[in-house]
Image (cartoon, rainbow, N blue to C red):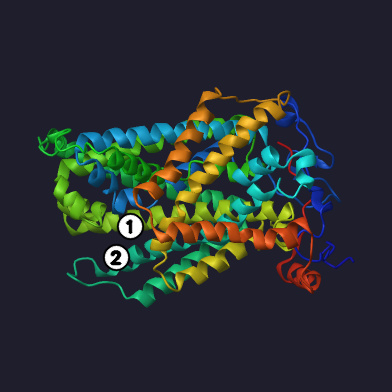
Amino acid sequence: MQYKNGFSVQGHEGVGSSENVRGRGPRLQRSEGQAEGGKCAGVEGGRPAPNDAVNLERRVGLLSGVALIVGTMIGSGIFVSPKGLLERTGSVGLSLVVWAACGGLSLLGALAYAELGTLVEASGGEYAYYMQGFASGERKRTWWGPIPAFLFGWVSIFLLKPSSLAIICLTCSEYLVRIFSVGSVGCLPPSLAIKLVAAFVIILITFINSYSVNLATRVQNVFTAAKLVAILIIVVGGMVKLGQGNTQYLATGFHGSTKSFGDIATAFYSGLWAYDGWNNLNYVTEELKKPYTNLPRAIIIGLPLVTICYLLVNISYLAVMSQDELLASETVAVFFGGQLIGTAGEVIMITAVVMSTFGAANGSSFTAGRLCFVAAREGHMVDVLSYVHARKLTPSPALLFNASIALIMVIPSDIGSLIDFFSFTAWIFYGGAMAALIIMRYTMKDAPRPYKVPIVIPILVLIISVYLVVGPIIDSPQIEYLYASLFIVAGLIFYFPFVYMKKSVPGMGHLTTILQLILQVVPTDVMPDA
């Protein structure tokens, strides 16, 4: 059917009902030369040709790629409560060593992801790598091949991504409201106000990402720059204090270091979570300009930058406050600002937390929408979530779906404790991606690899990921880990009827048509040329 706005409406009958629509199936590998400068049928320069199917465009450059990595890695933690490592290691010296080691380990994982991102050019991060590593060719038709990718999408789309957005926006809201009560002793922001502002922030960020990719990347660039300026203020303030001779807290060195191997392991676990987000650029590979060069470059620039920032900020904190003061403070940066220049410093640091969390939430929404989009394109979610806006060329249905779940999660507001027990699942998926890379070294021997890491790196990251998954369960077994595992396995209840057996939900085709008309979205057909 043709409509006056120039696009046709196609209704599909539910999940997995159109296996061959929109180019689903294995992606053909291209040479590096083709990828950097060649043309796909119907696509030129990353823009749809006249009368061609609508698709995403490559509008994320190197600067925006670095901003996405840095902006999502640096959230509120380094400003609010960077005490986990210090608490577990027991000394200033050992905590700084672990901060640096965690940055190094994250860089190793990111370098392995750089090879994955240049080898498998689809967006979606781990989802795309699981499909290529475990479900390529004939394995895609088996009942077991697509399961790893589906379960990753199931957990990430319905829990991890929206809950992450909700928690970040709640933190942003709390500090935004707190600006109006600076200097008031014991005055806590009302819970309802925090929830309402958090909901507004989610809606605003979703609008920005749905309206324009360029606008979303500009917002990411600006807020990443703002948080780096805030970090620079902290570092300069700390260096001034050190120059004035305030070295007594750092001079304690390794005194009091824990001798417990378990404590050191959990310290690494906390530190690696502070670096989480290094893989976010892999979720938007299809929209990255010259991904074969810009993806590795963004990783090599972004990861060391974040590591240096974390180390310098911790040193600066310890130039102003003692180890006991740092451990006792729930808002370290605000306390730091107050110690330096009084109330004005508190306002500056609260503003820094607001900007930092807003930028992290924007990056989280940007990447979550692409994961949902790619999963739907493969038939693992309802078809309409794989559609893009006919004119804006943004995956607005996927973005709206992620925001809707996040808004629901804002209502109880106390979801952090639940997500803590699901956090170990991330390292299950990181380990799975390393396994997929190792498998593709054998199944795709002749595929061009513009960037290739030594095989020892993915093997090392795989071993570490196994330890980080098993370690917390052995060290402190709790029933919540069982609940988390059951939630993952529960995805199979939906996988077998709706994906493997391709059953459809009655009326889904009509609902898809209605949503197409309301949202003005259309199916995509091909990936933009690199």
Give the percent coordinates (x, y) of residue 2.
89, 65
Q: Quadrant of the N terminus?
A: bottom right
Residue drawn 43% across and 60% down? 480
How would you rate the neighbour count of disc 1 (Cα within 10 Å): few for under 14, some for 14-19, many for 20 or more? many
Q: What's the residue type where badge 1 is placed?
A: Thr
Mark sitting on residue 351 = 1
* Numbered marks: total: 2
**Front one among 88 and 351:** 88
Residue drawn 39% across and 35% down? 103
Residue drawn 79% across and 48% down? 24
Q: What's the residue type where badge 2 is placed?
A: Ile
Quarter location, residue 287:
top right
Left or right of 397 on screen, residue 514: right
Residue farthest to the right?
A: 1
Q: Quadrant of the C terminus?
A: top right
Looking at the image, is 46 positioned above or below residue 359? above
User: In terms of sequence position, does the residue under pointer 2 or pointer 1 come before the other?
Assistant: 2
SS at mark 2 in the image:
helix
**Label pair 2/1, CB-CB below 8 angstroms:** yes
Give the percent coordinates (x, y) of residue 300.
48, 30
Looking at the image, is 106 positioned above or below residue 496? above
Give the percent coordinates (x, y) of residue 191.
35, 75
Give the percent coordinates (x, y) of residue 227.
38, 48
Asked if one can make out residue 389 in the rendered structure from this viewpoint, the answer is no
Asked if one can make out residue 188 in the rendered structure from this viewpoint, the answer is yes
Q: CA distance from mark 2 to mark 1?
A: 8 Å
Mark sitting on residue 179 = 2
Mark sitting on residue 206 = none
